[in-house]
Image (cartoon, rainbow, N blue to C red):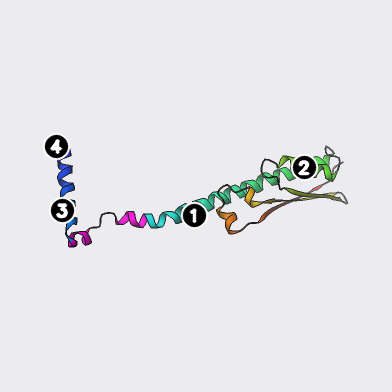
């Protein structure tokens, strides 16, 4: 008997057992599919939240590096003032967001910079920002060296 004919016979037997109410109730075919269909949205949402959080943390690390670079350049004299450091941060972070706010102060030889960026500009999917829309704040301090 050929393999295709054997498959047809098996399919007929399965269909025949489902015709009777007893056969339909006792059949376990497709039970896993129903459970997987019920859990699939939760798994997808979970992975979307993980992806959003990873992108937000990546944006925080990128922003921290930009702030450190600005403070370092101000500390060694490559940038002339706190306003120049704020402009440097704003222009360097435009690829992440247009709503970056930076505040730099120089007080008694200590450069302090604080920046904020909306989390909704860092997340791609938007699951996290739909639950909690917040501003990510990054700060850094550097001693003046010149």
Is disc 4 placed on a helix, strand or loop? loop
Which of pointers 1 and 3 indicates the residue nearer the eye?
3
Q: Residue furthest left?
A: 1
Q: Nearer the viewer, residue 72 or 81?
A: 81
Q: Nearer the viewer, residue 113 or 35?
A: 35
- Position of residue 141 in the picture relative to residue 125 (left or right): right
Which of pointers 3 and 4 indicates the residue nearer the eye?
3
Q: Pointer 3 and pointer 4: residues touching (CB < 8 Å)? A: no
| Image x and y of residue 22, in percent | 18, 62
Mark sitting on residue 2:
4
Q: Pointer 2 and pointer 1: residues touching (CB < 8 Å)? A: no
Q: CA distance from mark 1 to mark 4?
A: 46 Å
Mark sitting on residue 16:
3
Q: CA distance from mark 4 to mark 2?
A: 75 Å
| Image x and y of residue 117, in percent | 69, 50
- Position of residue 89 in the picture relative to residue 25 (left or right): right
Magenta: main secondary structure: helix
């Amino acid at each position: 008997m050929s393999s295709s004919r054997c498959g047809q016979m098996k399919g007929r037997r399965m269909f025949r057992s489902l015709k009777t109410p007893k056969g339909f109730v006792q059949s376990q075919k497709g039970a896993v599919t129903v459970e997987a269909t019920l859990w699939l949205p939760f798994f997808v949402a979970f992975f979307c939240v993980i992806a959003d959080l990873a992108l937000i943390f990546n944006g925080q690390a990128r922003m921290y590096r930009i702030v450190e670079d600005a403070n370092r350049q101000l500390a060694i004299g490559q940038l002339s003032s706190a306003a120049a450091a704020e402009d440097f941060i704003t222009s360097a972070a435009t690829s992440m967001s247009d709503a970056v706010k930076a505040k730099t102060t120089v007080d008694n030889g200590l450069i302090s910079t604080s920046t904020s960026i909306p989390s909704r500009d860092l997340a791609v999917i938007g699951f996290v920002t739909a639950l909690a829309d917040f501003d990510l704040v990054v700060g850094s301090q550097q001693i003046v060296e010149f």
